[in-house]
Amino acid sequence: MSDQSIMAAPILILPERSHAIASDLRATLGVDKVKDDYSTLTAYAVDASIYRMMPKAVVLVESEEDITATVRYAVERGIPLTPRAAGTNLTGSAIGAGIILDVSRLNRVLELNREERWARVQPGIVLAELNKQLARDGLLFGPDPSSGDMCKLGGMLANNSSGPHTLRYGSVKDNVEALRVCLQSGDWLDARAYGFDDPVCADLLKTHRPLRDLQSLIQENAPLIEQKRPAVSKNSCGYNLFGLVDGLARGRFDLPKLFVGSEGTLGLFSEATIKLVEKPQATLTALIHFHRLEDVGDAVPKLLELRPSALEVMDANTLNLIGRAKHGIPADAAATLLIELDAEVSQTDLRAQAERMTEISRRYRLTSDPVIAFDPEQRDQLWKARKALYPTLYRFDSRKKPINFVDDVVVPADRISELIRYLGEFFAGQRVPVAIFGHIGNGNAHIIPLLDVNDQGDFKKMVQGYHEIHQTVLGRFGGSICGEHGDGRVRAEYVKTMFGQDLYNLFVRVKQSFDPSGVLNPGIKISDRPFTDHIDYERLSKPCATCAKCNAVCPVYDVFQSEDMSSRGWFEIVTDKNYSYLNSKRVVEACLNCKSCRTACPAGVDVSQLILDRRAEHPNPTAGAIFYYHAQTARFGRFLKFLARYQSLWDRPLMRRLIDHLTKPFMRGLAETARLSPQLVLPRLAQRHLRDRYPELIPQAKREPRSPVAYFHGCAANYFDDGVGDAVIAVLRKHGVEPDLPPQRCSGTPIETYGHRALVKEGARVNLASMAGYKKVVTGCASCTLMLKDYPTLFAGEPEQAAAQALAKRVTHISEFVAQSSVKPTMASQQSTKCKVAYHSSCHLRAAGVTKEPGAILAGLPGVEYVEMPDADRCAGGAGTYLVKDFETSQRIVERKRRAVEQSGAEVVATSCPACMIQLRTGLQGAAEVKHVAQLLQEAYEAADR
Ligand SMILES: Cc1cc2nc3c(=O)[nH]c(=O)nc-3n(C[C@H](O)[C@H](O)[C@H](O)COP(=O)(O)OP(=O)(O)OC[C@H]3O[C@@H](n4cnc5c(N)ncnc54)[C@H](O)[C@@H]3O)c2cc1C
Ligand code: SF4
Ligand code: SF4
């Protein structure tokens, strides 16, 4: 039977029935788990590949029963079913035209055996999160794709992923003991390496026909499979029948070997038992810059003698494209190697290793001495550029994008220089810029040409390159077309060429046996369709790489685990040609404007800004009324003082419940979810506002500034009695500065989140004029800091832009001010025992580029034991007014922070933002005291005065 006739069998149901599909599934699974609205389908139409396919429905499974029901339904109706985890694959394997089954909500570690070093884990867990949990026991899951911050175990299993540390730990297939697999029949299989004489194996063979087929297939064809085994160190192309033949030789039916790397085409995983390794005691990372590419190929085998855990290469073009100066890479480096060496026991032998490494490197012409880092933070810095390479290439050109179509070839490691040389010549001939980097220790090269696929000429070059390069890798180098990324849609066309017709026919038989109806991820791995089908031409002209790095930090995605509630999904939705506020209001209004996505995005995309732009097209009328009143500072101030006077009366549990109830209709004008929850811990409103308490600091009207420094206190420090404003002033005074409190309006952050840009600009103009004469404008609020620094964007192309740029340069958060100050006031501790203090890093301060100073200040305080808190950089969920707009979600977000605080053992959580303080006090429920960094400084200075 030919492969064509085998694959032609099933006719899958498509379009017309889309609504019926979702409603059928809802009837079985419940409304919360099934989505088919415009926003959801748009968000799920992409993964990190060059493709796009609109699904008909998305199912967010929460149990094995949900998976079974969905599989049975899809098979019964002949609807394509695509499993999906984080959607970071580069091959188009997590998108499909039917049902997307998202496993992200199955994200727990179910069991951990420290002694035997294994864990039972669900497929929706993010690799970084898994390793964070394992690190508590000194353990690690070895395979480490560079996408580890965002990719999930399910996708890693299905793609047989690996990464820089494959050299030491192997690929996923080498690290899996067992899998729970839902077969197309809806039956569950515990896939392990069973002995053929094991009665359990006999039972399984009796129960599952596909297993019987598989057993005879490998027994009958072992010599052919053996003969076609790729002769390189790693391969993820085709089905891993090689692993099964290896098992056969050991008398084992090694089932995980088949399913790992099967890309959702043979079954769906609900959990995996994975092998773990000890976390190395210490590690060194080094960059070696070579003058000549030829030397790299020569140096690799010698460096491999040091048994590095990682050995990575970046070619000259890659270094140019990512910007040499930015990453401290010498202008004359022809290639850079990144090497990592682990110490199992102590740091001493690592230093000796470093010397040997330097000695080997010096045999070649280097452009500078190797850069060696032992400290985790510096090592992270060296890895940073390498890990974000692919999305960073999106910054290079607005039309030419990095296109993954020959991205994952493997050749013998000692021929990598020859490969790079060949590729350099090939792309030079095409006049196409290309980045070549990858796992040189394994001979695995990632080749990313930059092309405008909407240009006919570039499109032809892509197709030509696809065939020529793959053919050369197979013919001249005896390599593999796929080391770790999977075949997906992009390489399916070439699997037959890679292995030949006979072995390909066996793959087809395996597929047909496990998936006779053809519903499991059709078009992936086994397909005759050209790789150019379903290319997303529209998206490839946009600035987003769809890499999902932003999803990894998006607090809303963290809570909902659904792409329609995620930063990457929102980019897709708000830039889609069919976008309208009406069809997407639910999701457009769900963003916190925390800006974590902007800080994380390697491609320089600011999703939060795109969302704000969309909101500005539909300003919220209720918020407008509130903010217009708020802008009348004198009247608004009087109203708040009135509320302050009676706070002890109305801020009681019963009254707060009543207020919540009575204000609900009004609050609904802000958002469906908005309310004044009685659980919201309000700070005390000030009866005398900050400006009333420091009349001496208020500059006289129409006079020159008294001081070179203005304090931009913002709304919270003025209206609340939270101690922040007093602390900032006290700290400035200790540093010899008597600040001015010039007239000021709200910086604009909360106003902009409700779409009232004109009002933001009105306030910003007041602030620009008022802050104009000062050398420094000090803030104590993260959001004000960022907003003032962002005024140039607000006034882009407008007359105020120059003034805005001048102000942005002078804005300084109090923690930066103290760090830069030459005055070093004496400090002392208030108490005799040390107090454990952790830092919650406010998202807006990070986005403003202030990251190190607050922690450094805290670490230097007497009487303070500064503790690193897990997830310190994650949003706490307050985001100014978000805890009013959607209190329930904000509390789900802060839950993670509460666990982190508890784990850190901190008695005090310090932060840099009054708004974060409100959220932390509400969410921590007394688990720790909450203070501003300035307050802790003030205490230390005052203790010294006593
Ligand atoms: C910037 C960047 C860097 C990368 N670096 C690397 C790298 O160094 N090494 C590497 O190997 N890859 C790398 N990748 C590719 C990708 O991140 C990995 O392949 C990753 O393991 C995919 O995981 P995921 O959770 O995103 O899976 P998805 O993309 O969601 O899915 C991948 C495949 O798994 C299937 N699948 C998902 N869950 C299940 C399940 N429960 N049961 C059955 N099938 C399932 C899907 O159907 C699909 O076929 C990189 C990607 C990016 C964007
Ligand atoms: S916005 Fe940036 S981080 Fe997010 S998916 Fe796009 S490129 Fe990646
Ligand atoms: S601003 Fe925050 S909530 Fe909004 S998309 Fe970015 S990360 Fe997500």
Image (tube, grey):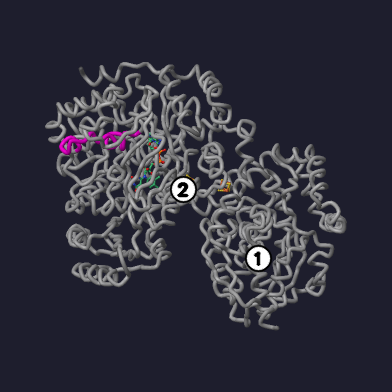
Nearest to N terminus: mark 2 or mark 1: 2
Tally the numbered discs: 2
Return the residue nearer the eye: 35 or 897. 897
Residue 932 image offset from top left, x and y in percent: 65, 65
Inspect the image, locate mark 1, and give the three-letter code of the amino acid beneath it.
His
Which mark is nearer the camera, 2 or 1? 1
Residue bearing mark 1: 932
For image coordinates 34% across by 61% down, the residue present is 280
Q: Residue at x 17, y 60 (%)?
A: 298
Q: For the N terminus, which image quadrant? A: top left
The kind of residue on which mark 2 rests is Lys
Say which quadrant the C terminus sits in: bottom right
Q: In this rendering, does residue 803 appear at all?
A: no
Mark 1 residue's CB less than 8 Å from ligand 3 = no
Q: Residues within 10 Å of mark 1 (few under 14, many from 20)?
A: many
The residue pinned by badge 2 equals 549
> SS for tag 2?
loop
The answer to whether one can see residue 137 in this image is: yes
- 473 sits to left or right of 782: left
